[in-house]
Image: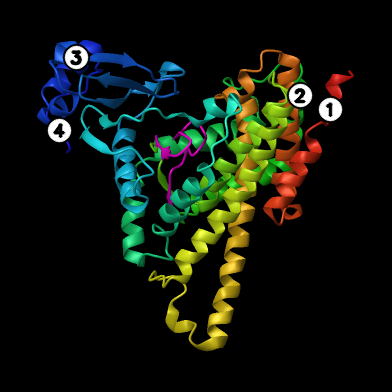
């Protein structure tokens, strides 16, 4: 259900939120008991929003409210509340295309920028599990199903040109969130920017080298242009391991407020990047050797599975009789036409893979030198050990971005990661 648009926006803290939810009969029935007895806990640990868990004697819900500014920075960085509307639209679309892989929507109020969703328990944020060296056997299968279905079915391969353009128009207003990505991922780490930070003093030299590396500047600028100018499909837009909740048997993708129509490789690259960062961060955490080896082996195996399974599922959807205006079937009749179309499908996927490799590199570098960092690295208490892990990740990322052609297959990425696992940066002996 969707709330009406009457009234003005206000931030709902515990008492106000309780009163608001108490006026929604369906939610009262779901939660049970008297509203006064509900427990309400603010648990938001992200960069932008308030997140509450509300529990009664019958059940619980999660409530997310957008703030009119970036929570990580404060009121000096205003941000449109409309992002909550785009998140609601994206979740609704994703629920249709990838059922069971996003939380159920229970209520939305556009004026309050507030959404009530299914409470995911006992799920945890995947990134927290990875820091604890947890392995998730269903993850690769689930995330590849999510990406293949949401990307394919919102692309020109599945839609008419008119349908696709209507989709682009529906999300075109989310440009403020896109601007955050354009600055924080594709621009700021490569220049002096007030909000940049890194593990100083160990990475000071590496940070300076990024600002002087013209090959890298060209490569990141090409990726930025593709991000801005290639509306291939509806993206989640922020598909990292902090936007995924998991158990051993379930995966749920959350927080698509950065959703827009962009290059498919951006979402795929984000998943690959966060797994690779978990791999490199592993060496910095205190772990038994056997546990470390098992976890790191699983991570790299998962990296390969993510690309391979995504590509297989995406191609299966395409081969199953795609009805989009791209590659019309009437142009590929007969055996010769079918063979040429299959060759073009393979070439398409190779281009998508190259995009994913580049975007994975961009996502890695921003998490080490930009504004918002990953706890994979941040929870390594010894700054020197942290910097070593980060330097290894950056060394791979630079190669992936500048020498993308040297990584024609996902095994080339994981092979390079293994070779860098024990590499020592210059500052170690400096």
Left or right side of 217 for 344:
left
In three-dimensional space, the C-alpha distance between marks 4 and 1, rounded to whole angstroms, equals 57 Å
Main SS of residues in magenta: loop
How far, Cα to Cα, is label 4 from label 2? 51 Å
Given this view, does label 3 or label 4 mark the residue nearer the observer? Answer: 3
| Residue annotated with mark 3 | 16
- Relative to 151, 51 lies left or right: left
* Labels 3 & 2 near each other (Cβ < 8 A): no
Percent across and percent down for residue 268 are 54, 47
Looking at the rendering, in which quadrant would you find the C terminus? top right
Q: Quadrant of residue 173?
A: top left
Secondary structure under tag 4 reads: loop
* Quadrant hosting residue 153: bottom left
Instruction: From the image, tell me which residue sits under label 2.
Output: 388
Residue that badge 4 annotates: 5
Badge 2: how crowded within 10 Å, few (<14), some, or many (20+)?
A: many
Q: Nearer the viewer, residue 397 or 195?
A: 397
| N-terminal label among 1 and 3 | 3
Check contact, mark 4 vs mark 1: CB within 8 A.
Answer: no
Q: Is residue 215 left or right of residue 374?
A: right
| Vertical comparison of 155 with 80: above or below | below
Where is residue 20? Give x, y as percent: 16, 21
Ranked by sequence position, the earlier of labels 3 and 4 is 4
Q: Observer-nearest residue: 110 or 388?
A: 388
- The image's mark for residue 424 is 1
The image shows residue 188, relative to residue 313, as above or below, that is above
């Amino acid at each position: 259900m969707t709330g009406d648009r009457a009234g003005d926006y206000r931030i709902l803290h515990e008492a106000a939120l309780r009163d608001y939810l108490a006026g929604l009969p369906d939610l009262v029935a779901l939660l049970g008991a008297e509203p006064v007895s509900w427990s309400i806990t603010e648990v938001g640990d992200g960069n932008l929003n308030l997140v509450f868990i509300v529990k009664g004697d019958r059940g619980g819900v999660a409530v997310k409210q957008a703030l009119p500014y970036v929570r990580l920075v404060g009121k000096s960085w205003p941000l449109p509340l409309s992002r909550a509307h785009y998140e609601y639209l994206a979740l609704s679309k994703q629920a249709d295309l990838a059922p069971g892989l996003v939380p159920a929507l229970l209520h939305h109020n556009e004026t309050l920028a507030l959404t009530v969703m299914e409470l995911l328990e006992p799920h945890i944020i995947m990134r927290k599990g990875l820091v604890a060296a947890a392995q998730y056997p269903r993850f690769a299968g689930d995330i590849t199903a999510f990406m293949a279905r949401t990307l394919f079915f919102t692309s020109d391969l599945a839609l008419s040109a008119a349908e696709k353009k209507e989709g682009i128009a529906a999300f075109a207003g989310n440009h403020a969130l896109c601007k955050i990505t354009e600055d924080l991922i594709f621009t700021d780490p490569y220049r002096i920017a007030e909000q940049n930070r890194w593990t100083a003093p160990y990475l000071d030299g590496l940070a300076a080298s990024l600002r002087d590396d013209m090959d890298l500047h060209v490569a990141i600028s090409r990726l930025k242009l593709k991000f801005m100018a290639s509306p291939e499909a509806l993206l989640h837009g922020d598909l990292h391991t902090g936007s995924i909740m998991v158990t051993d048997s379930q995966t749920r993708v959350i927080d698509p407020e950065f959703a827009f129509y962009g290059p498919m490789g951006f979402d795929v690259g984000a998943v690959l990047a966060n797994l690779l960062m978990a791999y490199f961060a592993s060496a910095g955490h205190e772990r038994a050797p056997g546990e470390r080896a098992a976890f790191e082996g699983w991570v790299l195996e998962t990296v390969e599975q993510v690309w391979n399974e995504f590509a297989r599922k995406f191609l299966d959807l395409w081969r199953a009789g795609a009805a989009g205006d791209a590659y019309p079937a009437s142009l590929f009749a007969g055996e010769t036409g079918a063979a040429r179309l299959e060759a073009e499908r393979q070439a398409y996927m190779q281009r998508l893979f190259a995009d994913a490799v580049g975007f994975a590199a961009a996502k890695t570098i921003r998490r080490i030198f930009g504004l918002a960092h990953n706890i994979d690295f941040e929870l390594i208490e010894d700054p020197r050990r942290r910097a070593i892990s980060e330097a290894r990740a950056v060394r791979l990322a630079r190669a992936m971005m500048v020498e993308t052609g040297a990584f024609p297959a996902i095994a080339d990425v994981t092979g390079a990661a293994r070779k860098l696992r024990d590499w020592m940066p210059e500052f170690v002996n400096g």
